[in-house]
Structures are given as structure tokens and as C-alpha cells.
């Protein structure tokens, strides 16, 4: 940090791996690329554009470093740049996986929240991934459209994915380069060895049992064989423009909670956390102590506060219900006033029961009245919320930005139960109340990124103290 309160990235080489649309293979490609570069002896820092929690679990397996989210809708441009700079400390190169299609973001009118927006903020070159499984020469037209839409974007090349064979891969690569004048760094064949299973919320997180190491090895082998890694590194290094980003209020949040212990639920059922949230709690003086709601009979000794993140409690409802001692302990401690912050899956487990996708109902903590019931309806999107009352994280009337992504709903909720937020309407809808906040408990389906407002972490730690 310099005298002006800025943190600097001294020309860290970086590249964004984007796609024409979701499902084009960005996660597999990015994980393989990270692993292949690491095999060359490079220290690679992974990032993921947008609010997703699941896809970023693949990159740490390849990098040996935590993947960090960069979200240009939830965070200010300055906060995004500062988060990037902090994450790159000690790295040789940064690999950034995009979200959805290159230009897809919060809305249709502007670029906010998109991969393109992030790439321009970071002055990073973009390598665009094309799915050629149902295209031949037409891929050139698609590539040309993406290249011309935004002249301010540093589109530096292409990768062709899902090709049927040598002739198909070479032909599509030729068509793309002929149309755009930009290089094609290679093509990847269809390969079952790098297929990732999915379920209702997308890919399966790597915190669950799976063939993850063999997947990473297979992805690295494909990338090393078929892509021009030297050319990719040349592009990354040619665009390694230094970024000077304000350190924002991270350096000003103080250390009010020295000695505070916050128990964080982390196991197969609970794994959805933004790493910046945990870093900010530590910066405010808290010790983060992980525990498993599936296996631990009680909270860690000396726990002062509780953070229940998102995840898949519905898939592990039977095991969570069987941990009777922990459920009883949580219910008693929360009733006694332990500061508790719960997001999405955390809210679900605090209700009286979870009804899973098979219609089976299992008892939960019971700190909140009503049940969490899985439905066939996906609730997803960015949320602009206003706090209805003073909470653990913010005073009444505070406007916050977050994200929602779930297939469950809270039913049998008493009408007089106090809400946490008033959610702003979108696309002609109406504002509606959401979540629960009273005393030392805040529970909501909305995920918040503390990096947008570091004082949220400070306030939580102060409550725990």
C-alpha cells in the first residue's frame, strides 16, 4: 500500500476465459488451464466472475490457492479492482473464469455484472470459448459478432470446444481466424473424462466425494495437448498493465473483536461462502473456526457467534436430523442470544424441518417457526434490499446488494414474524418482505458480499464481542 492508501498489482499477467453462453465448458477449460500452468511451475491465482459459489470450488484443486469472486454488480468498480489486487499477491499469473455469455450481466441495457465489464475494469485480455458441437464455418460469424460488439473490450483470441475431430477443429479454427483476424489458441475434443455431473443448482461442489483429482488431471492433459499455452501466456503478459486500486475501507475497519470466535459451518452440506467475507471477519479481529453440522456434536469451544452459509442441506437432511445433540445445542444457544447470521441453506436448517425433493420431512434446529420445502421453482437473481430494522449486520434503512439462488421456500411462517429486508421490485413486480431479523438473529435467502460494505463484518464481530 502506498501513501495514498492504494494497493498495487505490479503488472500481474492476467487473462479472462469467457464463453459465448453458459454451458460452453468454461469451468473445465479454466480448471485445466490452471493445472497445466501450475505444472509449468507457475503460481496461478484463480478468480470467478459473478456470484456463483459452486464453479469456484474446482479451481482451488488445480491452483492450490483459494478462488475469489469478482462481482461488478454487488461490488463497486473500486472494490472489484482492490479485491483483484489483494488476491493476486504472490501469484505469477491470474486466470479469471467468466460468467454466462461474455456480454450477459444484470440487465439488457448495460454491461454491469458481465464478464466484459469485469475485463475492462481489470484491463484484462479476453479469450472467448466457442462451442462448435453444432457449428462449422458459421462459428466465424459468431466470433465476428462478439469481436465487433464492443471495440473497447480487449478480445485477444478464441478457443474452440467440443469438436468432433481433427478436420472439424482445424476448419472451425480457420473460419474464426479468417473472420476476425484474431488467433485461435487451439481446439478441444469432446471427452467423457472431463464431464462434470450436475443437479438442480448446477455443478456438484468439490467438497462432496467425487473423482475430482482425476478430473483435474484429465483437464490439464487435454489443455496441454491441444492449446497453445505459450501464446496464451504471451497474451497475458502483453496486457499486464499495473492497476492502482483504492484499498477502500478494508484498512479502516479496525480490530474491534480481538479474541472473538465465530463458528462457520463447513462440510458437504454447507460450503457457500465468499472468501472476502471470511477475510473481512478476520480483519475485524475474529477467529474463524470451522465446524461440521453433519458430524460435530456441538459448536467449537469458546464460540461467540455463528455463521451458517448456504449449501445443500436438503440433500443431507437425514444426517442433519440425526445429529440431535448439535441441533439441541444450536437451538439453546440461539435462544440464549448467540449472534447468528444465516444465509439460504443456513436459514433452511434453522427452521423446524426440511422437506426434501422426495417429499420426506426431517426435523431441524427449530430456532425459526415453519418449514423449508423444496419446490420445482427456481428463485434466482440479484437483489437490492433495504433492512427493515437494526440487524447484526446493518442499521435499519440500509440499502444492500445481494444474490438469491434456491429451489426451496419457507412455508408456515407466522404472519407477524419480523422480516429482515424489503426486496426492491424488478421488471414491473412489487417490493416484498423477506427473511427474518430479531435480536441477535439474521436469517435470509439473500447472500451478501461483505466486500461491498466492509462495515457489515465489523458490526457482526462487535455483536459477537
Image (cartoon, rainbow, N blue to C red):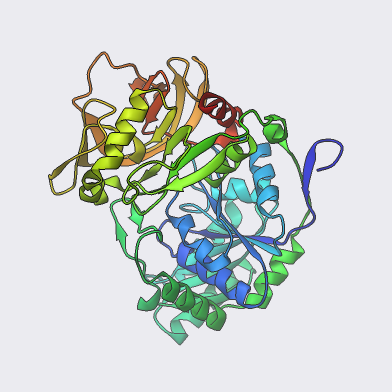
Residue at 56 percent of width and 80 percent of height: 224
Q: Where is residue 429 in the image (x, y as percent from the top left)?
A: 34, 24
Image side of residue 89 versus residue 96, left or right: right
Q: Which residue lies furthest to the front in this view?
A: 301
451 and 76: which is toward the camera: 451
- Identity of the residue furthest to the left in this view: 359
Q: Can residue 112 be seen in this view?
A: no
The location of residue 12, given as percent across then percent down, is: 74, 59
Which of the 4 quarters of the picture holds residue 299? top left
- Work out whether residue 452 or residue 175 is closer to the camera in this orientation and state it: 452
Q: Position of residue 147 (x, y in %)?
A: 59, 58
Q: How many marks?
A: 0
Residue placed most toward the observer, 414 or 380: 414
In this view of the protein, can residue 134 be seen by the observer?
yes
Q: Quadrant of the N terminus?
A: top right
Side of 120 relative to 318 (left or right):
right
Estimate the x, y position of residue 4 in percent, counting from the top left: 84, 35
The extreme bottom residue here reads 166
Q: Quadrant of residue 372?
A: top left
Observer-nearest of 166 and 361: 361
337 up-or-down from 168: above or below = above
Amino acid at each position: 500500500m502506498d501513501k495514498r492508501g492504494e494497493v498495487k498489482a505490479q503488472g500481474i499477467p492476467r487473462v479472462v476465459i469467457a464463453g459465448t453462453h453458459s454451458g460452453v465448458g468454461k469451468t473445465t477449460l479454466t480448471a485445466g488451464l490452471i493445472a497445466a500452468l501450475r505444472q509449468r511451475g507457475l503460481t496461478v491465482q484463480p478468480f470467478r466472475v459473478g456470484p456463483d459459489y459452486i464453479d469456484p470450488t474446482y479451481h482451488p484443486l488445480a491452483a492450490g490457492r483459494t478462488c475469489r469472486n469478482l462481482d461488478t454488480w454487488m461490488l463497486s468498480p473500486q472494490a472489484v479492482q482492490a479485491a483483484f489486487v489483494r488476491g493476486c499477491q504472490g501469484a505469477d499469473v491470474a486466470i479469471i473464469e467468466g460468467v454466462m455469455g461474455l456480454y450477459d450481466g444484470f440487465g439488457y441495457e448495460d454491461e454491469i455484472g458481465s464478464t466484459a465489464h469485469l475485463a475492462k475494469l481489470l484491463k484484462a485480455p479476453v479469450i472467448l470459448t466457442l462451442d462448435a458441437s453444432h457449428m462449422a464455418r458459421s462459428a466465424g460469424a459468431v466470433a465476428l459478432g462478439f469481436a465487433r460488439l464492443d471495440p473497447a473490450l480487449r478480445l485477444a483470441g478464441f478457443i474452440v470446444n467440443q469438436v468432433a475431430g481433427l478436420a472439424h477443429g482445424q476448419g472451425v479454427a480457420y473460419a474464426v481466424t479468417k473472420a476476425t483476424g484474431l488467433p485461435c489458441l487451439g481446439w478441444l475434443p469432446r471427452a467423457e473424462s472431463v464431464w462434470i455431473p450436475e443437479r438442480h443448482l448446477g455443478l456438484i461442489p468439490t467438497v462432496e466425494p467425487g473423482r475430482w483429482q482425476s478430473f483435474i488431471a484429465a483437464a490439464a492433459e487435454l489443455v496441454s495437448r491441444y492449446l497453445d499455452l505459450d501464446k496464451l501466456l504471451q497474451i497475458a503478459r502483453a496486457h499486464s498493465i499495473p492497476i492502482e486500486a483504492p484499498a477502500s475501507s478494508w484498512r479502516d475497519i479496525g480490530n474491534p473483536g480481538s479474541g472473538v470466535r465465530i463458528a462457520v459451518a463447513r462440510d458437504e452440506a454447507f460450503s457457500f461462502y465468499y472468501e472476502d467475507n471470511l477475510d473481512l471477519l478476520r480483519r475485524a479481529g475474529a477467529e474463524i473456526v470451522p465446524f461440521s453440522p453433519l458430524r460435530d456434536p456441538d459448536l467449537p469451544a469458546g464460540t461467540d457467534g455463528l455463521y451458517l452459509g448456504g449449501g445443500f442441506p436438503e440433500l443431507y437432511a437425514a444426517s442433519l436430523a440425526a445429529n440431535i445433540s448439535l441441533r439441541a445445542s444450536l437451538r439453546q444457544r440461539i435462544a440464549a442470544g448467540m449472534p447468528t447470521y444465516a444465509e439460504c441453506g443456513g436459514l433452511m436448517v434453522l427452521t423446524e424441518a426440511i422437506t426434501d425433493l422426495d417429499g420426506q420431512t426431517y426435523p431441524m434446529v427449530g430456532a425459526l417457526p415453519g418449514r423449508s420445502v423444496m419446490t420445482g421453482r427456481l428463485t434466482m437473481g440479484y437483489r437490492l434490499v433495504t433492512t427493515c430494522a437494526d440487524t447484526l449486520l446493518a442499521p435499519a434503512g440500509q440499502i444492500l446488494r445481494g444474490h438469491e439462488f434456491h429451489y426451496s421456500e419457507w412455508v408456515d411462517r407466522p404472519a407477524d414474524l419480523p422480516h429482515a429486508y424489503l426486496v426492491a421490485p424488478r421488471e414491473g413486480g412489487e417490493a416484498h418482505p423477506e427473511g427474518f431479523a430479531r435480536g441477535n438473529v439474521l436469517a435470509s435467502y439473500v447472500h451478501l458480499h461483505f466486500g461491498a460494505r466492509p462495515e457489515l463484518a465489523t458490526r457482526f464481530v462487535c455483536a459477537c464481542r
